Image: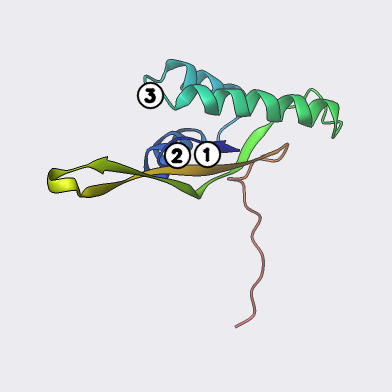
Amino acid sequence: MNLRASPRKLKLVADLVRGKKLAEALQQLDASLLALAQPVVKLLRSAEANAKNNHKFGEGVLWVSKIEVGQGPVLKRWRPAARGSAHPIRRPMAHLKLELSDINPKSKTKVATKK
């Protein structure tokens, strides 16, 4: 999903919901005062609907297993300055990737490693 927001600001919202149950994540974002919380809520609800309808996840608990924020395209604008010159203005955008799972991402099974 492309969002017209800085990746730095969107990472603050992503850190709120990473590794939580879907219901807890939605509740956390509804209580948040950050403006970028609303597009993330919309994305979570869409992912929940896709998981239940397209991928046949049951009524079990869904977890936000992975949420990634990446650098998107940058809109470049110009601001007029003195003596006919111009200064650049960068308007960064962000990519947001989300993955839901029915397994708790925090519960890791120990794997024997060979040294």
Left or right relative to 26: residue 57: right
Give neighbour class at mark 1: few <14, some 14-19, many 20+ (Cα, 10 Å).
Answer: some
Please tell me which residue is depicted at 62% across the width and 28% down the height of the picture: 44
Please, what is the three-letter code of the amino acid marked with disc 1?
Arg
Please tell me which residue is depicted at 66% across the width and 70% down the height of the picture: 112
42 lies above or below 91 = above
Left or right relative to 103: residue 58: right
Real-space CA distance between mark 3 and mark 2, rounded to the nearest whole angstrom: 13 Å
Q: Nearer the viewer, residue 34 or 111?
A: 34
Q: Quadrant of the N terminus?
A: top right
**Residue 36 locus on image (x, y percent):** 44, 27
Residue found farthest to the front: 84
**Residue 76 locus on image (x, y percent):** 39, 46
Q: Quadrant of residue 109?
A: bottom right
Please, what is the three-letter code of the amino acid marked with disc 2?
Asp
The reply to whether dot 1 and dot 2 touch (C-beta < 8 Å) is yes
Q: Earlier in the sequence, mark 3 or mark 2?
A: 2
Q: Secondary structure at mark 1?
A: loop
**Residue 80 locus on image (x, y percent):** 23, 41
Please give the residue where the numbered disc 1 appears in the rendered image. 18
Numbered tag placed on residue 34 in the rendering: 3
Closer to the observer: label 3 or label 2?
A: 3
Numbered tag placed on residue 15 in the rendering: 2
Please, what is the three-letter code of the amino acid marked with disc 3?
Leu
Give neighbour class at mark 3: few <14, some 14-19, many 20+ (Cα, 10 Å).
Answer: few
